[in-house]
Amino acid sequence: MADKFTVIREVASNVWTFSRPFSRFGILPVGGRSTAVRLTNGGVWVLASTALNPETKAKIDEMGPVQYIISADAVHHLFLGEFKKAYPTAKVIAPAAAVERADKTLVFDGVWGRDPPDTKYGFEEDIQACYFSGFKNKDVAFFHASSKTMIEADLLFNLPCTEQYSKTGSSGSIPLLGAFGPASWLHQKFAASMGEDKAAMKRDVKTVADWDFTRIIPCHGDVIETNGKQAWLDAYKIYLDPAA
């Protein structure tokens, strides 16, 4: 069935986003987004966080053969099965917390949090990964160096989700809340509250801070097209302060 709400966009060379409406608990509009990257070997890496509707599949197929299907954290696993069904030869890689919740018939080819920390999955020539073992949702941040893009799920929000609701007639704003972006006091409180291991958070936040990115593609909220590094530093400054 055709989908009239998904916004498909090439945000950078070889990087496509698939943005659509999604409301947490059916109430709070946070948006959803999958991201596909064409690798230098011609294959495609997909962070699969939204449904594989016909429009999404057509664009991904146009990009090349899917080699990797990625879950970015404990809760972004709902669509892994349908992606794997469509692309049976692709490797499915996810954090251990997602594996525990996902469809038990799925076979995982890599598991962050179980595999040795230096494990390579085959896409590292194009995309680096940092597993946040100290973050509540066990997120993984990704860095596509050639486009200077960081891709993530629940580590950083940039609400309201204007693009994701742009075909619905809704603004995508959360009533009474306003913006929930990386520089807001509320986001900084969120970052602090989601950290379950301060030492691990300091290590991994710094790893991401050392990446050379200008753009952030979040699963929830608008893409940060410029000054992405500063957005990260703002959101996670509590872990970057040497005195903290």
Image (cartoon, helix red, strand yellow):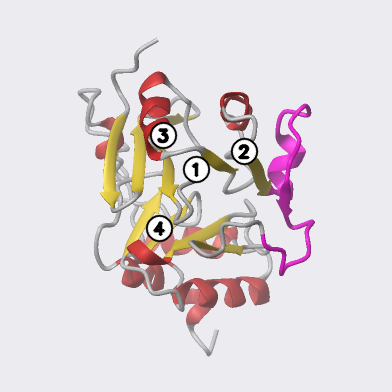
Q: Residue at x 72, y 28 (%)?
A: 103
- Looking at the rendered structure, the secondary structure element under dot 4 is helix
Q: Position of residue 143 (x, y in %)?
A: 46, 63
Amino acid, disc 1: Val
Q: Left or right: 121 with respect to 58?
A: right
Sequence order check, earlier mark of 1 and 2: 1
Q: Pointers 3 and 4 in contact (CB under 8 A)?
A: no
Estimate the spatial distance between the alpha carbons at disc 2 and disc 3, rounded to whole Å. 13 Å
Name the main secondary structure of what is drawn in magenta.
loop
Judge whether residue 155 can be spotted in this image: yes
Answer few, some or many: residues within 10 Å of disc 1's Cα (few below 14, many 20 plus, some between 14 and 19). many
Amino acid, disc 4: Leu
Q: Which mark is residue 46?
A: 1
Of badges 1 and 2, nearer the viewer stands 2
Residue position marked by numbered label 3 in the rendering: 60
Of badges 1 and 4, nearer the viewer stands 1
Instruction: Say which of 166 and 196 sits in front.
Output: 166
